Image (cartoon, helix red, strand yellow):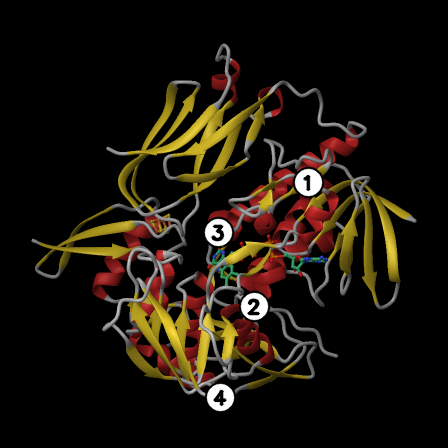
Amino acid sequence: MEKRNLTCIGCPMGCLLTVELEGGEVKSVSGYTCKRGDDYARKEVTHPTRIVTSSVYVTGGAIPMVSVKTANDIPKEKIMDIMASIEHVQVKAPIKIGDVIVPNAADTGVDIIATKDIAAV
Amino acid sequence: MSSYDIVIIGGGPAGLAAAASAKREGIDSILILERDTQLGGILNQCIHNGFGLHTFKEELTGPEYAQRFIDQVEELKIEYKLNTMVMDINSSKEITAMNRTDGLFHIQAKSIVLAMGCRERSRGALNIPGYRPAGIYSAGTAQRLVNIEGYMPGREVVILGSGDIGLIMARRMTLEGAKVKVVAELMPYSGGLKRNIVQCLDDFGIPLKLSHTVIDIRGKERLEGITIAQVDNHGKPIPGTEEDYTCDTLLLSCGLIPENEISRSIGVDMEPVTSGPIVNESLETSVEGVFACGNVLHVHDLVDFVSEEASAAGRNAAAYVKAGGTLGEKSREIPITATCGVRYTVPKKISVNRMADEQIVRFRVGAVYKGCYISAYLNDERIIHRKRQIMAPGEMEEIKLKKEQLSGFDGLENITVKIEEA
Ligand SMILES: Cc1cc2nc3c(=O)[nH]c(=O)nc-3n(C[C@H](O)[C@H](O)[C@H](O)COP(=O)(O)OP(=O)(O)OC[C@H]3O[C@@H](n4cnc5c(N)ncnc54)[C@H](O)[C@@H]3O)c2cc1C
Ligand code: SF4
């Protein structure tokens, strides 16, 4: 039996989780406060993912940058590919929360969307 | 002079939630004063996700979380003034503020909610004599530059202090192509959330050196490098442990401190431990009808708790106004003593007949405790004894006191909250 200790990143509570593995399969998870901790532990030991957040330039807006995020989590090893996909992106105001900024970023099947409303000026 | 029932100082998450809840309690005359160009407070520059899980059951970024509350304020048609700096408030609740259109003006309030948030500690963070070349920023300033202005402060970065903003900026600058070489923390533990250590440092292989500090800075015009060293128990550098790093940027992330110049001008009693006002069960300061919530009261790490606390403050301000300037008869106030590892509590005193059926008491511990108990006593009788796997200064703790338990306790003199060993 293999044991792995993790810190849940589902929320800032940061619960300490213990996963018991046997032959690469999750046998048990303990230490979580809510179900997300259980889900996270199972995923983190098999295929870890992350939400990536950043910001891109805006033209004609009330402020120069709009914050963005991947609409869903993406494989952890793709973080830098996601960043490369928005490096030279520029969008035009107005922008609404949820607007797609880059569709299917870095071929992950996940869109990059705006996380802030920006009025045109 | 214009007058309002409730004036809210600060349009961050605390101010927005306080305004919305006061309005829902039936108060129409509410005004929010905000010095920034937009509502939302510090959340506007916190573009990372992780906000709102407890409130909305989903993970939002800072701006998204803020927008939900901005939308409520708009829907409830609550009045606000942007670009308006509150300069002073006196003890009769007369507010002096300033903006470009109105100039210097005065407002009379029946009740005031303080929601000014906090600012970064800066002085004393870098205790080194000599030059201050360009390239040294507070982590929050760097966050604003990168996320809102779109300007990268540098390419090779060292971070002093492992507060959350520093950790988040370690990841942010790495994602933008900078090389973050090391995060040095003076204390033997990190002041940041565990989640941020995992997601912002471990994910990118950025080393965190605990019990380390910066002892030398090189470069005249522009920063060229720094030296860090390990420190002993008294924070003194240990000879022989020096390590040199070349870098063009040094970020200082040494914690936050409530922004309370205005609270002091009103004359409210302050808690030296938190640098925030002392409040009772109703989040009311020592000046009747003046309430405080959010980071101005004590520095929070979870915005959900800020919103929750602020809603209570807004509700109480509304009750105060509706009852014609009182919160109702006050029974004797029972002090809450924080001791044995508990640094402070919010609230610091409770009037039993005014408390809610369940009163949340929040606090922080002074060191890392493993496998210990949080205990609460009424006089000498222990009523709460809860085991915690781990407690750390970076994470706020809470207990809940029940009204029936307190009101049924004969001769209650004091409440004590402490950490007890197993
Ligand atoms: C870098 C960072 C990362 C964080 N990460 C997380 C996270 O991952 N998850 C999470 O849940 N929480 C997080 N938090 C915590 C959360 O964002 C804060 O606790 C919350 O924003 C506090 O809200 P507030 O309204 O009290 O203060 P603020 O957001 O600071 O708002 C205060 C407002 O008052 C205004 N003001 C101040 N003085 C005056 C004056 N004299 N006149 C007029 N206006 C004034 C300011 O301009 C500001 O808009 C983070 C905080 C920071 C700083
Ligand atoms: S288990 Fe639940 S409460 Fe604990 S950190 Fe994970 S998401 Fe948060």
- Looking at the rendered image, the disc whose residue lies closer to the viewer, 3 or 4, is 4
Which residue: 51% across, 50% down?
B300
Q: Sequence order check: which comes first, mark 2 or mark 4? A: 2
Q: CA distance from mark 3 to mark 2?
A: 16 Å
Is the residue marked 3 within 8 Å of ligand 1, measured from its CB? yes
Q: Pinpoint the chain carrying mark 3.
A: B
Q: CA distance from mark 1 to mark 2?
A: 30 Å
The amino acid sitting under disc 1 is Val
Q: Pinpoint the chain carrying mark 1.
A: B
Is the residue marked 2 within 8 Å of ligand 1, measured from its CB? yes
Mark 3 vs mark 2: same chain?
yes
Q: Pinpoint the chain carrying mark 2.
A: B
Q: Where B79 sits versus B168, above or below?
A: above
Indicate which disc residue A103 carries: none
Q: Pinpoint the chain carrying mark 4.
A: B
- Cβ atoms under marks 3 and 2 closer than 8 Å: no
Label 3 sits on a secondary structure element that is loop
- Residue A68 % position (x, y): 52, 73
Q: Sequence order check: which comes first, mark 3 or mark 1? A: 1
Q: Where B183 sits versus A102, above or below?
A: above
Q: Sequence order check: which comes first, mark 3 or mark 2? A: 2
The amino acid sitting under disc 2 is Gln
Indicate which disc residue B45 carries: 2
Q: CA distance from mark 2 to mark 4?
A: 31 Å
Which residue: 81% across, 49% down?
B95
Label 4 sits on a secondary structure element that is loop
Q: Sequence order check: which comes first, mark 3 or mark 4? A: 4
The amino acid sitting under disc 3 is Leu
Residue linked to disc 4: B220
Label 2 sits on a secondary structure element that is helix
Indicate which disc residue B268 carries: 1
